[in-house]
Image (spheres, rainbow, N blue to C red):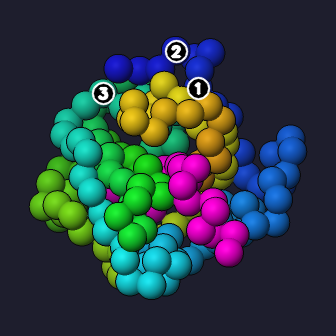
Amino acid sequence: MPCPASQTPDWLTRDLLPSVPSPGVCDWLFNEQSLTRRLTELSNGGFSVIPLREGWLALRDDECAALDVPAGSPGWVREVYLRGNGQPWVFARSVAARQALQGSGLDLQQLGSRSLGELLFSDQAFTRGELQACRYPATWLPAEVRENALWARRSCFRRGELAVLVAEVFLPAFWPVASR
């Protein structure tokens, strides 16, 4: 279900953010390395991916704009928790437009509990677009982690006609561990 325009956040690059987060937060929001690898390291190997929901859905307007497809376009949506030592640290939502995904050779339905980020970073054909950040709308989060104004980041990975938009929301349980 598309989010009302009044709830759609402004995804902004670091230089356009109205208030710059602390250096520690910025390091996680704008670091271009694989988040999966960084979380695996931070958790001393206790990293896991827990799928929450995936399937063909209408993409949100902000996602359609980022993927350069018409508003309301159908796409593959995958939502997961990236966990460290059994605790959800990051909520991730990855989307790709149906038309570009079909025939691309990338089968997102087969990922299961594997990390999409690791797949995207291991395929040299994908190029990563600029990182953007926002305060993520609570209504877009699963009920059990719903909280206002959590920091999130997103970037678009492209390979030919295929674009995969990956958004990652840093949950409250993550920051105490990240700041050690």
Give the labeled residue for mark 2.
Answer: 4
What is the spatial separation of the Cα atoms under label 1 and label 2, in whole angstroms? 7 Å
Q: Is residue 153 positioned above or below 116 on the image?
A: above
From the viewer's side, name the closer residue of 88 and 31: 88
Q: Nearer the viewer, mark 1 or mark 3?
A: 1
Give the magenta part as a residue range.
155-180
Residue at point 54% right, 50% down? 171
Is residue 84 on the magenta stretch?
no
Give the labeled residue for mark 1.
Answer: 8
Q: Quadrant of residue 64?
A: top left
Q: Regarding mark 3 in the picture, which secondary structure is present there?
A: strand
Which amino acid lies under the numbered mark 2 shown in the image of this protein? Pro
Image location (x, y in percent) of residue 106 = 21, 63
Can residue 126 be seen in the rendering of this structure? no
Q: Regarding mark 1 in the picture, which secondary structure is present there?
A: loop
Q: Residues within 10 Å of mark 1 (few under 14, many from 20)?
A: some
Q: Mark 3 and mark 1 in contact (Cβ < 8 Å)?
A: no
What is the spatial separation of the Cα atoms under label 1 and label 3, in whole angstroms? 15 Å
Q: Is residue 123 left or right of residue 39?
A: left
Residue at point 39% right, 47% down? 93
Q: Is residue 43 left or right of residue 30?
A: left
Q: Between disc 1 and disc 3, whose residue precedes? A: 1
Can residue 12 be seen in the rendering of this structure? yes
Q: Mark 2 and mark 1 in contact (Cβ < 8 Å)?
A: yes
Q: Between disc 3 and disc 2, whose residue precedes? A: 2
From the viewer's side, name the closer residue of 161 and 33: 33
Give the labeled residue for mark 3.
Answer: 58
